[in-house]
Amino acid sequence: DVKVTQSSRYLVKRTGEKVFLECVQDMDHENMFWYRQDPGLGLRLIYFSYDVKMKEKGDIPEGYSVSREKKERFSLILESASTNQTSMYLCASSPGLVSYNEQFFGPGTRLTVL
Amino acid sequence: QKEVEQDPGPLSVPEGAIVSLNCTYSNSAFQYFMWYRQYSRKGPELLMYTYSSGNKEDGRFTAQVDKSSKYISLFIRDSQPSDSATYLCAMSAGNAGNMLTFGGGTRLMVKP
């Protein structure tokens, strides 16, 4: 069964802290994505990666960075967390560089920055 | 103006009703159209996928795409309480890396 796991379901951090969100997929997918989901705004793409050590900015990369050292793992880093980064963070993966592929999502991490 | 517009709801219907969920979009390059369903405290999962214009049916669900009007719909027949969820439309131009552009989601509540 296809699986994307995220390291935490709920996380509470303080302003200025460095925050790591981890995502692991077991499907040998090339593509991995990080989104944030806010009420009324849907899913907005932060970063994506189409190969190990490759990364591309999405629509809202400011304040975030990513790391992909292994194919199955994609990490989102908040260098200095701020209250406006309080959100639901969703990781997804999909296979290959073809016209369309379904994205498989993890359960999400609800991050609160105080 | 957002690239993909979707009424946030909530939409409340009685069990057994026909539900119509809709999205409009502005980017004529979109060719792949999807509907994702997201239950509370879960990640989205793909429900329906359509390429270009036309209809696609899967059980109680029908997806329609009208590219000339830049309008897509999802119909749910004989709605059930288990259909209560947030429905997200998503679209792609088919570019490398498979970028999806999502609507804001419509929250649906089906009451027994």
Image (cartoon, rainbow, N blue to C red):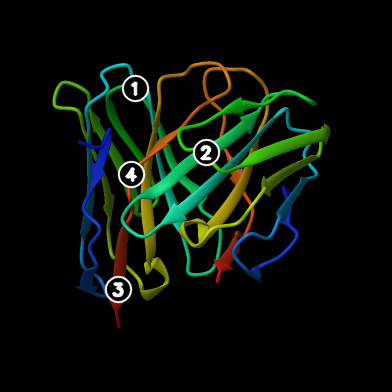
Cα separation, mark 3 vs mark 2, equals 39 Å
Which amino acid type is shown beneath numbered disc 3? Val
Q: Which mark is residue A65?
A: none
Frontmost of labels 1 and 3 is 1
Which residue is the site of mark 1? B30
Which amino acid type is shown beneath numbered disc 4? Gly
Relative vertical location of residue A48 with respect to residue B9 in this rendering, above or below = above
Which residue is the site of mark 3? B110
Q: Nearer the viewer, residue A35 or B100?
A: A35
Quarter that holds the C terminus of chain A: bottom right
Which residue is the site of mark 4? B103
SS class, disc 1: loop
Residue B108 appears left or right of A6: left
Q: Earlier in the sequence, mark 1 or mark 4?
A: 1
Q: Which mark is residue A62?
A: 2
SS class, disc 2: loop
Q: Position of residue A7 (x, y in %)?
A: 75, 60
